[in-house]
Amino acid sequence: MLSEILRIVFFLTIPIIAIVFEGMHRKFMAMFQHRIGPPVVQPFYDLRKLWHKQTLEDNNDPFFKNAPFFYFLSTYALFLIIPFSLLAFDYDFIFLIYLTILSSGFYVLAGVSSDSPFSITAAMREMVLMVCYEVVLAVSVFSFVIVSGGLSLSSISSHYLAFSLPLASFALIAVSVVELKITPFDTAEAEPEVLTSVETEYSGRRLFFMELTNYMRRLFYVLLVPLLLFGLRSPFLYVTGGFFTLIGLSLSQASTPRYRVDQAFKSLFFIMIIALIEFIRVLSGLVWVF
Amino acid sequence: MGVLKEIIINFFKEPFTELHPFVKKKPKERFRGRILYEADRCIGCRLCEKYCPVKAVDFHEKGRIDFDMGKCIYCGLCRDVCPVKCIHYTHAFEYASSNKEKLRKNLV
Amino acid sequence: MHDFVMPVGPQSPALKEPMLLKLKLEGEEVRSVDMRLGYTHKGVEGLLEGKNVDQAMYVASRICGICSISHERAFIRTVEDMMKKEVNERVKLIRTILFELERISSHLLWAGFMMHEIGFDTLFQYLWREREGVLDLFESICGNRVHKNICKIGSLRYDIAPVQEREVLDCLDSMQEKLKDYEDEIKKNKVIKERLKGVGKISKKTAIEYGLIGPNARASGIDNDVRRIDPYDSYADINFKTIVIKKGDAMERTLLRMREVHESMGIIRQCVEMLPSEKIPKFSLTNIKEGEAIGRVEAPRGELFYFLKVEDGLIRRAKVRTPTFAFIKILEKILKGVKIGDVPVIVASLDPCFSCMERVLVAKEDREEWMTEAEFRRKYSC
């Protein structure tokens, strides 16, 4: 009973945790770049400011008006399964994949329905990349689930799979780099090219929801990677894993420039092939020999 | 891998930047900041007024000159042309203000 | 695919100064480019008129924040030419040192900015950190970090003290190794290579056609360096080489500037060694009645040209031709047919400085306009 309440409390505090993780991400970036950087609570200040800002939008498209809320809800729903499953049922990983696609879909919808050429370009880029990375995500999550021998994500949490699935782990990390929109795959958020990408036209509370959801998506991948790779046997190990994942992703952002969209697509295609190789290997029951 | 190594080293080093309003960097000796004018030594030759490139010097009478710090470009020409050297540049640089009248009279 | 016009600027993270590029897109590809300028027109040439040369020099140095010594230097060269004035060896050498320090500061600023355009923010921060050392030197030697205002006609405001000589050398030593590292990273990093190699290619023929100057021309194989063809200060006595590369793409332009930084360091080291122990002349107000002269220097971005006409001790007419003004038109040619992702890289790789560049130029295709100067002034109220 107690653990049930704890899980619900954790689920409710997800936005706050996401903001803190975003603050930590900024701090790590600053440390890699040899500067002090903003305080960890800086995203709180940003969001508080956005919440009180006037909404200035010149677009009455219902898709444009509502997409941020659906984007927020579909992303929040991801945390029903990860890291503690509030809804435990068989084949929940399919639900997970479905939700990630839905969340990305609303993001693209928000961009396409706004009038700004920057948003549309960014949304088109995101769409191009989405075709690839959702497949990679699905294939690598399937591999993990199959190897763990269970039918749901909760069965993974007792396994330690990083070394039995090296290629899928690599693909998963690569996908989280793409999903987090950090370099080298942040083409959809390339500031000099498409300004603030999909969010260009948004302001006020809608922008608040877009930003908060972006933070939550980051948190989701930071939680997903250690869960699949190292399992959830001890909370301490899990938190440390998440922490190091965040540092690793920050390092990736700090040490690479950004690909152009066609180059990013090519690299993603390569990663997709890697993930597929692993998937076929898992299906045919072969084992890596080291 | 020079840069990657440096990135990792910098992660554990003290940051290069400073928290400005709390840690103040001292300007160098030759720094040109806010103008300090010694009214009692002034001889009223009006050279500073004549030579100021942006007309920031407002001469009223001998010993009463307003330096408009909102217009000043800190070129140092008024100090150079002053025959009695009664114009100085101090090290103060944080006196931004939205009060134009005060800036105009160098009072902020 | 969806066709639309994407405005880059006047306020855009891709450009650090205002300018409007209207890109007609087809999908991700640029079909045609329309350029609008004039957002930072300050009318500096008009401001210069009616001032005496001592004042006007400081206004001229405000044309650009990055190459303020270059503007001062070009102005002084023009005036000293007008007066047929010779300055002593020490002044010349110190001017050379400051001039080259400014080139380092400008190139580092630009290189960091270039890295930001391709999303490598860490290298951007590191390059600017190194630049900070140069700015500190400026503060120590000249008094201010950006608008240095150290030059005087025929002299200098301050001398370089022996302590500062040491500071200059120490700064260069500490910078050199790091810059080598960063240069290697730019050369070797796979993603940077993919982003920069072959992007924004300018052939030698196009470069000549569009009048490219400075580092951009040198990257396209044109040996164009005012320091060599028309030496001033102590460049004639100093041993340095002009770097010329053939390929002319964004990568070569980046590497060329990084190599020029090292060349500048060499020049500064030689100058510091050669500094004689004489005194710099005391500053005195300039006394010119009449004259007309031109002068040019090699600013960090290329040839900077000044024309001044003095009547009754006041400037009657001034003409400034900044490097960016000479080559900005090429953007319309090289941006055609590139991917939208390459546009910021190409624009940045030319190192334009728009606030330098904003001059009045009336060019109308459909009808000719003939105006006297007075009419022109009336029409454009300057």
Image: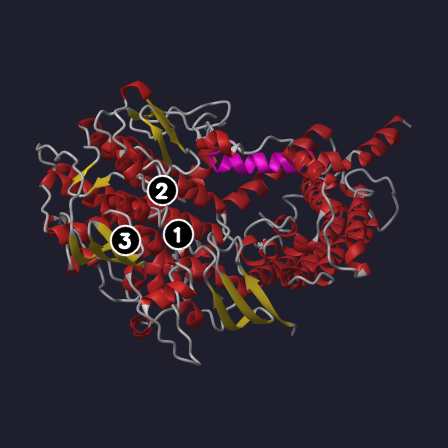
**Residue extending furthest toward the bottom:** C366
Taking the spot 27% from the left edge, 62% from the top edge, the residue there is C218
User: C82 and C215: which one is in front?
Assistant: C82
Residue assigned mark 1: C186
Q: Which residue is mark 3?
A: C299
**SS at mark 3 in the image:** strand
Q: Identify the magenta region.
A: A20-36
Gap between marks 1 and 3 measured at Cα: 24 Å
The kind of secondary structure element at disc 2 is: loop
Residue at the spot 27% in from the left edge and 51% down from the top edge: C260
Identify which amino acid the numbered label 2 is placed on: Val
Q: CA distance from mark 1 to mark 2?
A: 44 Å
Q: From the viewer's perspective, is residue A199 above or below residue C142?
A: below
Chain holding disc 1: C
From the image, which quarter does the C terminus of chain C lie in? bottom left
Q: Nearer the viewer, mark 2 or mark 3?
A: 2
**Element assignment for label 1:** helix
Mark 2, residue position: B54
Q: Quadrant of the N terminus of chain C?
A: bottom right
Main SS category, magenta section:
helix
C337 lies above or below B106:
below
